[in-house]
Amino acid sequence: MNPPVRARRRFLGITAAVSAWALVPASLRPARAASATPTAQWRGVALGADAELRLYHPDPRAARRLLDQALAEVQRLEKLFSLYRPDSALVALNRQGHLDQPPADLLRLLSESAHYSRLTDGAFDPSVQALWQVYVDHFARPGAAPDGPDAATLQAALARVDHRAIQAGPARIALLRPGMALTLNGIAQGYITDRVTELLRAGGLDRALVDLGEIRGLDRSAPGQSAPWRVGLAQPQDAERIHTTVEIRNQAIATSSGYGTPLDPAGRHSHLFDPRTGRAQPRYRSVSVAAPSATTADALSTAFSHMPLDATAPLVRQLGLRAWFVLADGSVTAQGRDAPSAKSKDRI
């Protein structure tokens, strides 16, 4: 394996990578490796998060073609899911309260969202955009109360938050409560990561690593022919400190942390809202989830941020996940395969 490289993202980064040559499909390797340098790479922003694609292929033209296809897919999906593009399908849905003949990917992602909302008893809910607006408006005012919006304001916003009031079908998506608005930021990055990974696999890559806000590894090599990727989970208050190193192969990993997007100058309130209470102060400093898909990892790291450990543990076991919770005192609790009990803590 190559020496560790510096984590690019604040909470989640590749701390070590297999040799670039190992990413080349075995059937395409010549007798000797000519270079361990990516034949095509891109760094940019997708849905507001740092993103990176690195492709390794013996044919630079094939690598460039796959990279162009991947970037086109990112742009296509961002045009559907973005809250900041005035021409996005999501902005149109929020503005009108309905969307006729919705794009298939938007419908599919809302179906996925509904699944995770039911699975977590509403801890994951894409209709929390109303809470975002309330908090942003509150802290934009001079002399805003540091405790956040008052109870009456929060209750008025919560009347517009309910995943069960999203009606989605092939002919029409409708928001059934006046003033409702959706955000897909807690799941869309994972969904896009999955779609790009599938595109690269369909394009013939046996082994790839995709980082589009969440990280997913693809590996179709025979057992023992390749090493797993190692992903470092950073301490939320000190990105230079890695509290856990996780190995992934055909898995994805996502991290949610309130330290990523504070809403107030003191950093007490974050973009991670509890859909049931309106609270913007997560239980944990950060939550990381490793799952078979980036969509799952993204949605559940978001939901777990407001769920007690005795509620997350059954889901981790049921779905075969791994999860890491950085608690308020800086200790780490791990759940899932090869993890200690949910009550155990490892000081970092």
Image: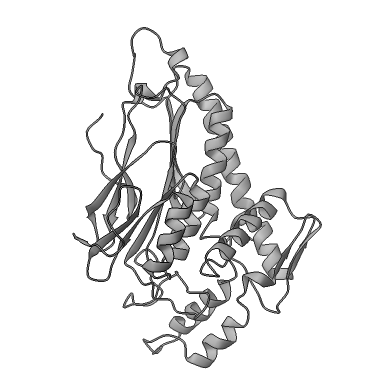
Q: Nearer the viewer, residue 239 or 206?
A: 206
- Percent x, y of residue 71: 55, 39
Which quarter shows the C terminus?
bottom left
Residue, x 56% and y 44% (percent of image)? 74
- Percent x, y of residue 102: 75, 55
The quadrant holding residue 88 is bottom right
- The residue sitting at the top extreme is 31
- Percent x, y of residue 259: 34, 66
Question: Taking 28 as reference, is 121 left or right?
Answer: right
Q: Nearer the viewer, residue 214 or 51?
A: 214
Q: Is residue 180 visible?
A: yes
Question: Taking 212 as reference, is 337 left or right?
Answer: left
- Residue 204 versus residue 302 in the image, above or below: above
Which quarter shows the N terminus?
top left
Q: Can residue 48 be seen in this view?
A: no
The quadrant holding residue 56 is top left
Q: How is the structure coloured here? A: one colour
- The residue sitting at the left extreme is 347
Residue, x 63% and y 45% (percent of image)? 76
- Residue 248 versus residue 226 in the image, above or below: below
Residue, x 43% and y 76% (percent of image)? 280
Question: Taking 318 as reference, is 286 left or right?
Answer: left
The quadrant holding residue 109 is bottom right
The mark total stands at: 0
Q: Nearer the viewer, residue 124 or 317?
A: 317
- Percent x, y of residue 28: 46, 13
Question: Taking 269 as reference, is 122 left or right?
Answer: right
